[in-house]
Amino acid sequence: MTGHTLGWVAVAVAALVAGCGDKPQQNGDQVVLIGQASPLTGPQAHLGKDNENGARLALDEINAAGLTLGGKKVVLELKSEDDAADPKTATTVATKLVDEGVAGVIGHLNSGATIPASKIYSDNGIPQISPSATAVAYTASGFKTAYRVMTNDAQQGTVLGTYAVTQLGAKKIAIIDDRTAYGQGLADEVEKAAKAAGGEVVAREYTSDRSTDFMAILTSIKGKAPDLVFFGGMDPQAAPMIRQMKQLGMQAKFLGGDGAQTPKLIELAGADAEGALASNPGLPLDAMPGGNAFKAKFEAKYGKIQNYSPYAYDAMHVLIDAMKRADSSDPAKYLAELPRTDYQGVTGRIRFDVKGDITGGAVTLYQVKDGKWQTLETVQSGN
Amino acid sequence: MDIFLQQLINGLVLGSVYALVALGYTMVYGILELINFAHGEITMMGAMVALAVIGALALAAPGLPGVLVLGAGLVVAIPVCMALGLLIERVAYRPLRHAPRLAPLITAIGVSIILQNIAMLIWGKQYIPFPAVLPQGRHEVLGAHITDVQIAILLLTMSIMLMLILVVQKTRLGRAMRATAQSRQVASLMGVDVNRVIASTFVIGSALAAVAGVMVSAYYGLAHYYMGFLLGLKAFSAAVLGGIGNLGGAMLGGLLLGLIESFGAGYIGDLTGGFLGSHYQDVFAFFVLIAVLVFRPSGLLGARVVERA
């Protein structure tokens, strides 16, 4: 690069930096920036864009309705950033949002990205609401700024364990996990809850997220004659596991978490998938209190809903709701209002516990019938 | 007892697949003293090609009997893998035959990565389901269950192994292979076309890999661009356990490894009172491998260099 072009780059950078510092003024109204972070490129881009659209829809509605904080008219502006579902990029993006002076953040999408970013928001006192991160570790760090509006893995595990014993009538339960943070975490919670509900865990076996052969552990499990086999892991393992249970002539029911509740599971396990059970956090869209209205609004503007946009939409409303109650967009002031949230959103009623997890979040159970996932029942988690 | 018998069946089926793949490693090593790390990927390619054919056939002619469809998959997959083995030998190994031993090892790893990526480009990163064309028959023997697919795997591997032994021991090609294994120079002085013998070794090994790949994907009901890696690693361990370079050793090592894994995963938790769980399955298998190698560094049947093929 010649000295000449280098000079131009320096000018351009200077202009950009200056531009960032400038908060555009519209008719003398105060502009408040709200951050949004999700993967906007890469294999999960469709999910990331979906989150962004959900947050944007809520923000546009609030702007259209008019927002007044501390006696001043306020216009909200969305700063959307791409974290590429990558933990390292997520910290860069979080720092950027903080430097730009956002008053709060909706995001991130993935647990792996949300957790490292949450420390940066916490250090700078910026409230953060994740629409879709479910790993327990996110709110377990004790950061005062970390909130989420989706049921976490522990809550899902508790519901699954209890449901297996009380609703499915399983007295003897075998538990397998794939030794990942997700699978192991979920399986541990299921074990605790099943025991608490009076079930007996007759076997605890382990595999990996690369295995396809479960004959040995399933045979060992079969010897203990369980009524139900729970698997904490993803569909590429769950599908052959279900097939091998049938090959071994096992009568036990199969139960999985959200990693197994996918169309791919049915494709891979074929006819053997029939009768398999699995859960997913939250309600199915058509059963959400505001699901159909949200769907109509969202699809008119952005097209098909991918997955988490109703949660991003609610997260934005919850954040602004706290600002309204504090009558301020100053993070130091409205952060104190977030624990007092009681908001009736599209996805359900939203309240937080001391850690920032949603209380009484819903978990829905599904079963494969006629080669399709059919909604079985929605359970409100206890805490 | 029924649990024990079931684990025995599990172990034998798993072990015979390992043995079939291990034969490919051991044959090449016997002749070239080269570890063909791309062998696992040839297995994967066999599975993928067969799946593509079976999927297309199942769509085009839904009424066809499952065995016929599977046979068609094999008939296409075997020559494709043979050609692949031939090509790999010609392009990646033959030019390096007089290079230091590390060089072909590196190209082997390179070929394995290339094959994985080609498969990923063609078939994607997704797990591919095996179409439900095979009979799902299941038989109960003394409380243990054995499926038609498992019986087919056992019978097929046993007959292939017998055939291979006959080829190596009784045919001209087999004699040439044994001679080349003992000394490449002397064999070529005796009029053996060493290049042809080596190429044939790769072709035969690749054909076995193709069969193993199809069996594995039929057994587990899925295939994946990454499936050759772990299978290759296990089969390689089996070959080392039995004594790499020795045909009987590969078979013995494969069956042993399958049985150790199966019984290890099944009983380790109960035997240690829950202290060690089934996640120590691989640790257990490799512990046995290390123990064998400490006392018999050339593997269980690896000492008799004369008989390697």
Image (cartoon, coloured by chain):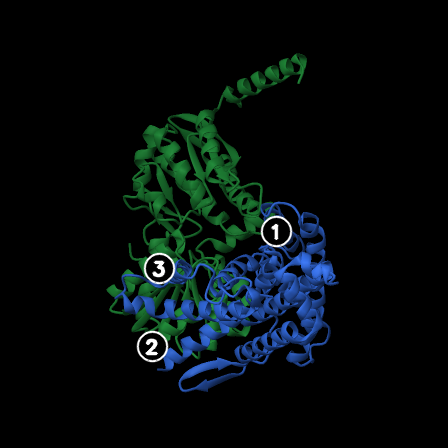
Chain drawn green in the picture: A
> What hue does chain B carry in this figure?
blue
Residue at left offset 68%, top offset 55%? B88
Q: Is residue B307 above or below residue A334?
A: below
Q: CA distance from mark 3 to mark 1?
A: 40 Å
Q: Residues within 10 Å of mark 3 (few under 14, many from 20)?
A: many
Would you say the residues marked 3 and 1 are in contact, meaning their CB atoms lie under 8 Å apart? Answer: no
* The C terminus of chain A, quarter of image: bottom left
Q: Amino acid at mark 1?
A: Ala
User: Residue tagged by mark 3?
Assistant: A187
Q: CA distance from mark 2 to mark 1?
A: 46 Å
SS class, disc 1: helix
Q: Position of residue A187 (x, y in %)?
A: 35, 59
Q: Is residue B122 visible?
A: yes
Left or right: residue A120 compared with residue B146: left
Left or right: residue A270 compared with residue B207: left
Q: Which of B205/A48 is in front?
A: B205
Q: Amino acid at mark 3?
A: Ala
Q: Chain of mark 2?
A: A
SS class, disc 3: helix
Q: Is residue B62 above or below residue A158?
A: below
**Disc on the earlier residue, 2 or 3:** 3
Q: Quadrant of residue A4?
A: top right
Q: CA distance from mark 2 to mark 3?
A: 19 Å
Mark 2 vs mark 3: in front: 2
User: Residue tagged by mark 1?
Assistant: B108
Q: Which of B226/B16 is in front?
A: B16
Q: Is residue A133 above or below residue B227?
A: above
Label 3 in the same subunit as label 1 = no
Left or right: residue B296 compared with residue B58: left
User: Residue tagged by mark 2?
Assistant: A225
